[in-house]
Image (cartoon, grey):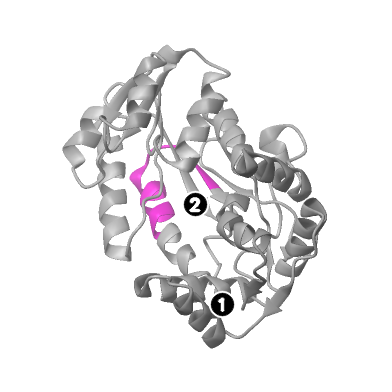
């Protein structure tokens, strides 16, 4: 069985490759990257992995890369709606052309109903996969704990934790857990046409900061502001103008419950308890200090 992981140079894709290498032979794993000359791609080759070019803007590279592949993990690309749908459509059509047997896709929490601005893009991409007729597994991942590392570093330097998300809850997840869960379902039989919700415990940002304070053994100040104040703080901190609407909409979406999970299949796919927020923060902070 041949498994192709696209986005293998990225944060999630590379973790999936690492997890696969613990369970199957290098001959069974193909890695897809946008730049086959990159340092990561060279590293993969040195490990004995086959590296294939997967440029989502050039469908011919995807058709070639998907040749002979049984199961493909199609990473979610980033950009405006038109861009991501063009790229995603290229990938799905390439999978059909290459007769790929199953598609695996990382979506977002409750993509079918969430008002989070990201959900609409993922919902459309889920539909494209479902309508392709290819068996699929959709993994709706909640917010990575690693997404907060920039804010955490700021807090470690004395800055407050600032949010306009109010009491909105997030089911933060540890990226290696998601990679392991994805690996398990990539390798398992069954799971055809299943959609899994992968979330951690639903917590407010105040609860997150309380846990962070405990791990750091340092009281982190917490500032809850409105969207306009949040945007101004980001702008004053040097955040590029193009990112401001997205970041503010994310806070609004969290405030409205967009990342609060109704249930999670993570423990089921891991066959163990997920890594707790406290444990994950401890590991992340240890790695940050190295």
| Res. 245 image quadrant | bottom left
Residue occupied by mark 1 = 252
Q: Who's the residue at 26% across and 44% down the image?
A: 56
Going from N to C along the chain, the mark reached first, 2 or 1, is 2
Choose between 83 and 92: the one closer to the eye. Answer: 83
Q: In which quarter of the image is the N terminus?
A: top left
Residue occupied by mark 2 = 107
| Res. 73 image quadrant | top left
Res 66 seen here: no
Check if residue 109 falls in the magenta segment: no
Choose between 268 and 162: the one closer to the eye. Answer: 162
Residue 158 appears left or right of 137: right
Q: Residues within 10 Å of mark 1 (few under 14, many from 20)?
A: many
Tell me the tag on residue 72: none
Q: Who's the residue at 74% across and 60% down the image?
A: 202
Q: Who's the residue at 60% across and 86% down the image?
A: 226
1 over 89 or under it: above or below:
above
Q: What element carries label 1?
A: helix
Query: How far is mark 2 from mark 1, CA to CA?
Result: 19 Å
Image location (x, y in percent) of residue 290: 61, 37
Image location (x, y in percent) of residue 246: 44, 71
Image location (x, y in percent) of residue 232: 49, 83
| Res. 273 image quadrant | top right
Residue 195 appears left or right of 246: right
Choose between 188 and 36: the one closer to the eye. Answer: 36
What stretch of residues is rendered in magenta?
124-139
Choose between 215 and 32: the one closer to the eye. Answer: 215
Res 97 seen here: yes
Of labels 2 and 1, the one closer to you: 1
Q: Who's the residue at 61% across and 57% down the image?
A: 153
């Amino acid at each position: 069985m041949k498994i192709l992981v696209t986005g293998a140079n990225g944060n999630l894709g590379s973790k999936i490759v690492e997890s696969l290498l613990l369970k199957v032979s290098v001959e069974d794993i193909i890695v897809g990257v946008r730049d086959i000359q990159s340092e990561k791609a060279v590293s993969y080759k040195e490990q004995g992995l086959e590296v294939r070019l997967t440029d989502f803007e050039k469908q011919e590279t995807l058709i070639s890369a998907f040749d002979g592949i049984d199961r493909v993990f199609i990473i979610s690309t980033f950009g405006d709606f038109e861009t991501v749908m063009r790229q995603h459509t290229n990938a799905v059509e390439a999978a059909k052309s290459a007769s790929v047997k199953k598609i695996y896709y990382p979506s977002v929490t409750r993509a079918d109903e969430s008002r989070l601005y990201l959900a609409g893009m993922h919902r459309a991409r889920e539909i494209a996969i479902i309508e392709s007729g290819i068996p699929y597994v959709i993994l709706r991942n909640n917010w990575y704990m690693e997404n907060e590392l920039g804010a955490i570093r700021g807090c470690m330097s004395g800055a407050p934790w600032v949010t306009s998300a109010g009491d909105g809850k997030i089911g933060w997840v540890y990226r290696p857990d998601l990679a392991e869960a994805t690996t398990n379902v990539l390798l398992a039989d069954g799971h055809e046409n299943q959609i899994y919700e992968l979330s951690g415990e639903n917590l407010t940002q105040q609860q997150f900061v309380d846990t962070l304070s405990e791990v750091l053994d340092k009281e982190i100040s917490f500032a809850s502001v409105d969207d306009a104040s949040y945007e101004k703080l980001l702008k004053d901190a040097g955040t590029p103008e193009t990112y401001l609407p997205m970041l503010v909409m994310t806070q609004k979406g969290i405030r409205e419950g967009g990342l609060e999970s109704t249930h999670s299949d993570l423990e089921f796919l891991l066959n163990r308890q997920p890594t707790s927020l406290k444990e994950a923060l401890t590991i992340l902070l240890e790695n940050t200090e190295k």
